[in-house]
């Protein structure tokens, strides 16, 4: 049978990262490829206690259908979390609980995008956001970035040129680069968006994972016009195995997102929501995040150190203040895709950067990037793995020189 | 701010059922409006035991990100379930685990429908399926039904006339009518679909809830051409609070659905999937369904009896063999929407039929329907509630006569 698929399926590809992750199953492989939290940080005993309490105290309610917008007490907690992050006016009506923050992106696209509508993004940007927007036949326009994130002048030019519907941005410890959008740029970017009536999708899964420097308030904290949709998740701070995220924003947009969610999955797992709510009631979530920060921060510092000590001259990398990723740029002429094959042979994995470019790697330098994850590997594996990667990098460089 | 929403949002409305459900919170209200399972049937202790075991034995894996297609052992179980339902060749590659069967409908629409594509449906049909397809700007064409379900001659005419992309059908104890599609019609309909290259979406949430008559094999059991996507769920047989459903079908279509799911929510709650898998391993799921059948069957028989004893002449209703709903037709001139207001005043709720018609109630008789749910009310409430409804029905009839 020759199925007549929808047009959008012509654009959509399985995630390249997920394909690469299959190689992680090979014995002795050290992987810096995924974006996985460290399982040794999961609060397994606490989640077990919460599941037990939820089912003992309100089992019949927890196992019944639930309202689309989310479990009331959990919405309250996410609203309080938003106020804690600097978004003062957030009330329960401004929160939609989603099945992970990925669903937030899907619903936002569903509510706002018609085929051909333009989405402005950082370039490179989060792969699964590209997929979510592609599913609604969005067109992408990349905005130039530097070490402080999106360049406001480039954004203004893109707004005028592309007449976009959305700006999608990851201000804290961006995936894949690890770069943080500077505070003064957040203000300039917000003002540009507000002036042009552009909706800003602020994706902030990593904001709590800061290892150095000072917290910067989200773009949503500046939002007077009701144009920012802030998306976050408990995947990095509690566990991704429970699919619980949220979207915060203006009530009017949230109502539309709720209608779209009703058609998409009725509601997020009732028991998952109640377990998260219970966890945030009965346990000290902030102290737990402090432990995650200590572990990831040490891994991050070690990876930076190992890169400095072992990588051949000509390779450069970003210096993030938090998150889960480092972004390496190889010297001119060294192709990261070709490097990956050699790396797999030497039992170390990374993700080549090319798939993170929403409009494809538009310059020759698009082939010159490697994304490295440091949250999911032990310190021993980081030492050995970066050693292996440095050998591969040296060989690749020799190949260009030779 | 005047948000520029996508075109599809112009079509989408919040579910009328969900609006009516708000009235269920009034004191003394007896509701036949929702489509809720009976909470006294939820296996709370068993789910608690499963959660405990999953977290004790594989907590770190259960709380990590997971593959999009679903937890392997659970896919195996759903494949076995499909074989048990008569779909002989089902293997794990033919199963995609979804976040409830609602997500199955959303993903199918995403993969197959472009704006303006025609979906053939029974009329009336499941409200949230209409919403799922509307979100992709589908056009609906209703196919005539009678007491044995979809009329094959009407289907053939509609295929020729509308050139549809999909046929959406609920063969067992349809929502909202309770009607079952006759076995010989399933074969004729399948053959028509195969001849015209039409994909059939067979939605079967209630198939295991049969109270009388013989099981009929699903349309999927006839599928040689790979054109049937069979959608089901554990919501009615275990619990809807864990959002776990599945789509079964041809590997090629399933791969596209998997790509779409990746962009929609990465994967279904890992812990929910493992709890369901554990439940189906450690407990006798079929014996539990037998208990549900006994309870619902008794409620169903009682509701039929109460309707027979109390409803004024001129009112008629369907005689389902299973499921959760009865469908009442009022006499000519009696408007179910107006009846609802009076019913709310007398503290009894139902859902007026008009919203279940995908293209609107096309005849005057579109206003003459009431959907009654019998699974969620105790026998005492059924007695009292149908008594109240009969009074409202009598008054409405007198209003027409007067």
Image (cartoon, coloured by chain):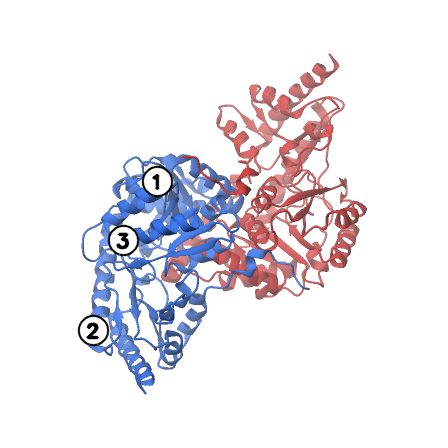
Chain colours: A blue, B red
Position in image of residue B370 (x %, y %): 66, 30
Foreground mark, 2 or 3?
A: 3
Q: Nearer the viewer, residue B224 or B132?
A: B132
Mark 3 highlights which residue? A181
Mark 2 highlights which residue? A308
Q: Label 3: state its secondary structure.
A: loop
Q: Chain of mark 3?
A: A
Position in image of residue B6 (x %, y %): 51, 43
Give me the disc on residue A195. Answer: 1
Is mark 1 in CB contact (under 8 Å) with mark 2? Answer: no
Instruction: Examine the image and state in which quarter residue A349 appears.
Output: bottom left
Q: Residue at x 63, y 41 (%)?
A: B126
Q: Label 2: state its secondary structure.
A: helix
Q: CA distance from mark 1 to mark 2?
A: 44 Å
- Establish if A385 lies above or below B123: below
Instruction: Examine the image and state in which quarter residue A174 appears.
Output: bottom left
Which quadrant: the N terminus of chain B?
A: top left
Q: Chain of mark 2?
A: A
Foreground mark, 1 or 2?
A: 1
Position in image of residue A15 (x %, y %): 46, 64
Q: Residue at x 68, y 23 (%)?
A: B335
Q: Same chain, marks 2 and 3? A: yes
Q: Chain of mark 1?
A: A
- In this picture, residue A383 sits left or right of residue A129: left
Mark 3 crowd level (few <14, some 14–19, many ≥20, 10 Å Cα): many
Q: Earlier in the sequence, mark 2 or mark 3?
A: 3
Position in image of residue B177 (x %, y %): 68, 38
Q: Same chain, marks 3 and 1? A: yes
- In this picture, residue B234 sits left or right of residue A143: right
Q: Same chain, marks 1 and 2? A: yes
Q: Residue at x 68, y 28 (%)?
A: B367
């Amino acid at each position: 049978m020759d199925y007549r698929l929808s047009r959008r399926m012509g654009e959509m590809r399985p995630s390249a990262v997920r394909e690469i992750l299959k190689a992680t199953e090979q014995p002795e492989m050290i992987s810096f490829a995924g974006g996985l939290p460290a399982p040794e940080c999961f609060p397994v005993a606490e989640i077990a206690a919460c599941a037990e309490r939820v089912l003992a105290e309100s089992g019949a309610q927890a196992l019944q259908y639930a309202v689309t917008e989310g479990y009331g007490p959990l919405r309250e907690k996410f609203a309080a979390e938003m106020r804690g992050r600097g978004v003062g006016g957030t009330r329960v009506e401004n929160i939609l609980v989603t099945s992970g923050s990925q669903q937030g992106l899907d619903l936002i696209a569903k509510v706002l995008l018609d085929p051909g509508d333009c989405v402005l993004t950082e370039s490179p940007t989060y792969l699964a956001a590209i997929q979510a927007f592609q599913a609604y036949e969005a067109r992408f326009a990349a905005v130039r970035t530097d070490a402080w994130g999106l360049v406001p002048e480039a954004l203004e030019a893109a707004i005028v040129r592309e007449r976009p519907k959305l700006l999608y941005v990851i201000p804290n410890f961006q995936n894949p680069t690890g770069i943080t959008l500077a505070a003064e740029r957040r203000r300039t970017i917000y003002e540009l968006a507000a002036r042009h009536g552009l909706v800003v999708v602020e994706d902030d899964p990593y904001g709590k994972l800061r290892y150095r420097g000072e917290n910067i308030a989200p773009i949503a904290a500046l939002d007077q016009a009701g144009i920012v949709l802030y998306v976050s998740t408990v995947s990095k701070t509690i566990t991704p195995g429970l699919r619980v995220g949220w979207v915060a924003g203006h009530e009017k947009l949230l109502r539309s997102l709720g209608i779209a969610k009703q058609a998409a999955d009725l509601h997020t797992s009732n028991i998952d929501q109640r377990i998260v709510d219970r966890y945030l009631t009965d346990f000290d979530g902030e102290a737990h995040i402090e432990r995650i920060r200590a572990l990831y921060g040490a891994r991050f510092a070690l990876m930076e150190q190992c890169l400095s000590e072992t990588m051949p001259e000509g390779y450069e990398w970003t210096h993030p203040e938090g998150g889960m990723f480092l972004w390496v740029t190889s010297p001119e002429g060294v192709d990261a895709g070709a490097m990956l094959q050699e790396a797999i042979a030497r039992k170390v994995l990374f993700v080549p950067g090319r798939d993170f470019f929403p409009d494809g790697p538009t310059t020759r330098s698009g082939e010159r990037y490697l994304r490295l994850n440091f949250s999911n590997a032990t310190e021993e594996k980081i030492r050995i793995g970066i050693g292996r990667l440095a050998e591969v990098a040296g060989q690749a460089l020799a190949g260009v020189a030779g």
